[in-house]
Amino acid sequence: MHSQEDRALRQLWGLEAPTVRGPKPRWTLDQVTAAAVALADDAGLDGVSLARVAERLDVTTTALYRYVDSKTALVELMVDAAVGDPPQLTDEDWRQRCRAWTDHLADRYAAHPWLSDVRPERMPCQPRVYAWIDALVGALDAGPVADPLRLALLLDSLVRSYMALARNLNDSPPPAWLGEALATRFPRLTRAGDQDAADARSELDFAVDAVLRGVA
């Protein structure tokens, strides 16, 4: 027997058909997940609960247990829906394929900032998470990169790290006095970079370019 969490994930993989016992469900698993994603987009991950998702769908919390039995299970489904399908990587240059991949993944994090708040506690179990890695590995497989999988995992971790930084800076900007204090105590750092122009997305671009130069 599979747990409700396991059954929901198996449905994502096409390994198990939706439960048909009892009355016909009012909503599909995809619709429940979409409602949870919309709630997280509005209120953040902490604002998501089975009760609030049930309220959005105009059902009882008990009825929602037909689909998922915990917030942990629901978040796994939400991540799969939020990252979506990977892009088609058609650029001739392998570096441009890497940049396009990281740009598209960063866009998904920008569209759903709560993704940065998801803390993995085990290997991912969502098919679309693997589809993103597979897409880049496939785009690099016939090129000069010696280990496409490791490069894909490294770029994935860069996107996660810098988009989490972007989320944190947006939610908790530095105090107004810090710029002047930095200029006074650490003038070399101030001269080295324009503090006003720097942002997490441009820093991500720099990090990706640095990695690709190293790989080349």
Image (tube, rainbow, N blue to C red):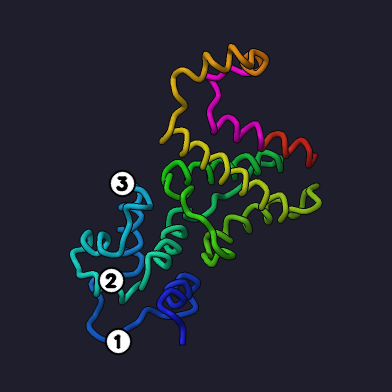
Looking at marks 3 and 1 on the same chain, the residue that comes earlier in the sequence is marked by: 1
Q: Residues within 10 Å of mark 3 (few under 14, many from 20)?
A: few
Q: Local crowd at mark 1 within 10 Å, few (<14), some, or many (≥20)? A: few
Query: Closest to the observer: 154 or 84?
Result: 154
Which amino acid type is shown beneath numbered disc 1?
Answer: Arg
Is residue 204 located in the magenta-colored stretch of the structure?
Answer: yes
What's the amino acid at mark 3?
Asp
- Which percent across, then down, holds residue 168? 47, 38
Reading the chain from its start, which is encountered first: label 2 or label 3? 3
Distance, label 2 to label 3, CA atoms, is: 20 Å
Q: Circles 2 and 1: CB distance less than 8 Å?
A: no
Vertical comparison of 41 with 7: above or below: above
**Which residue is label 2 attached to?**
64
- Tell me if 116 is positioned left or right of 194 in this view: left
Q: Residue at x 53, y 28 (%)?
A: 199
Between the residue at mark 3 and the residue at mark 1, the CA separation in whole angstroms equals 33 Å
Residue at numbered disc 1: 21
**Quarter of image, res 187:** top right
Residue 202: quadrant of the picture: top right
Residue underneath mark 3: 42
The residue mark sitting in front, 3 or 1, is 3
Relative side of 154 to 22, left or right: right
Spot occupied by residue 206 in the image (x, y as percentages of width and height): 65, 31
In the rendered view, tell whether residue 128 sits above or below residue 98. Answer: below
Kindly state the secondary structure of the residue where label 1 is placed. loop
The stretch in magenta equals 193-207
> x and y percent of residue 39 in the render?
30, 53
Q: Magenta includes 46?
A: no
SS of the residue under disc 2: helix
